[in-house]
Image (spheres, rainbow, N blue to C red):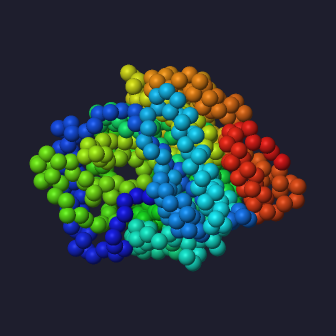
Amino acid sequence: MGDEIAGTSFTREQRTRYREKVRRCLDVFERMLADDHFDATAGVTGLEIELNLVSGSFQPAMANAAVLERIADPAFQTELGRYNIELNAPPTTLAGDSLAALESALRESLNRAEDLASEASAHILMVGILPTLYPEHLSGDWMSENPRYEALEDAVLGARREDIELDISGPESLRMTIGSIAPESACTSVQLHLQVAPRDFADHWNAAQLLAGPQLALGANSPYLFGTRLWAETRTELFMQATDTRSPELRNQGVRPTVWFGDRWITSIFDLFEENVRYFPALLPETTDEDPEAVLAAGGVPRLQELRLHNGTVWRWNRPVYDTVGGIPHCRVENRVLPAGPTVVDIVANAAFYYGCLTMLADDERPLWSRMSFAAAEANFAAGARHGVDATFYWPGYGEVPWDELILRELLPLARTGLQRFGVTDDVANRYLGIVEARCKLRRNGAWWQTEVVERLQRRGYSRADALVEMTRRYADGMHSNEPVHTWELP
């Protein structure tokens, strides 16, 4: 959800004061890195899942306040749209059968939440973009009651000084203008966190950037927006366009978007925070009374709230995180690449693949990023999002290679070894990596299943709108079965 703020509008004086405070926080952060003030514990993971709420007819249910009141669990939080909520899993390690325990806990939490949501005439759906969402659902009272969201919309539109234009082309094309950031609420994702020592952060972030393309080919689940078939993972492009603070002229000048893959390999976590401060103006310039220099000089741990808040409005697909727990600071890589769903077991399988590969690529004596351009990694990311199971990547040692061959021959063995390093039991690793292997061999992911079902239904005479509703109904059944998406039946 992001850090809370108190106000929704800001003066020029506030913006000037915030800019100065962010730079002070950045200087203190650099000093903390140099003096090694951080928790060096590695391997602690976290997971967040953004969720949709639907009615009994599988239309968006603008009911998150009522649903959250009934759930009454701090693990569930509000999100941008009134038809969105978020589930936060507690931090854990990967050792032993922790992944299996995570699957069980997530399923239990979601089952309980589903039962309580039904009391508010709503149901929970895990999917990258809700297939039955249309522009008319995003007019009127669509935004959750939270000052942060109102302030964020004002900031984005104020920076643009014009309406937001969506222009996405895939098998079909969508072009429209809208006077709000409402389409961003359609983007529901899974965020995977991994705590790493600051000295190891750059290697892990670079490795995560390399994995972004394969992650999308494996897990794409967002092929439809407003009834139109676009990319396999339309969510990535929609998120960028729906929050774009740049006018067309600034885009033409090469100004960076706030939803950003990056433009280079890094050597330190500081590189990313410094880039955020150097390249991106503040969207939510709210300052606190903390004196970070004084706190650090007194032997304390500064919260660096202004730096954290600014970092939270630069939506890198792999984001650096500074946080404190029990008065001890730590650093995390937050992977934001994957969509929500299709099932809990699919989500945990995606996580197992990511964590296992990540630790091996980060520990390579001859790092892959020393043999591959950053532009190639970004092109892989775009190919995975656009094409899903039809994606082809560039990879050192292979040249141009289909995604499934790359994962089966290169990345899956790495993931298995990486999970062994984390101490994951063989039975648990086999369960989740077996799902990844089967998805590759069948060349099926959530996006493939959605489009295949809709096409079959349309050939039977369904309209596109009716086919999307029926597909979503079948999707919900599959989601609740917790059977991997590659095993779901087709009509």
Is residue 238 among the parts visible in the rendering?
Answer: no
Report the front residue among 332 and 17.
332
Decide: is 71 above or below 327.
Answer: below
Report the front residue among 274 and 67.
67
Residue 166, image quadrant: bottom right
Decide: is 434 above or below 189.
Answer: above
Where is residue 113? Give x, y as percent.
59, 55
| Residue for point 40% across, 47% down | 319
Farthest residue, direction bottom: 140
Is residue 289 among the parts visible in the rendering?
Answer: yes
Where is residue 466? Give x, y as percent.
79, 63
Report the front residue among 11 and 67.
67
| Residue for point 55% across, 43% down | 105
Residue 484, image quadrant: top right
| Residue for point 74% across, 65% down | 57
Where is residue 61? Give x, y as percent.
63, 67
Q: Is residue 98 left or right of residue 475?
A: left
Q: Is residue 334 left or right of residue 100?
A: left
Q: How many marks?
A: 0
| Residue for point 31% across, 46% down | 325
Q: Image quadrant for the N terminus?
A: bottom left
Where is residue 471? Give x, y as percent.
76, 54
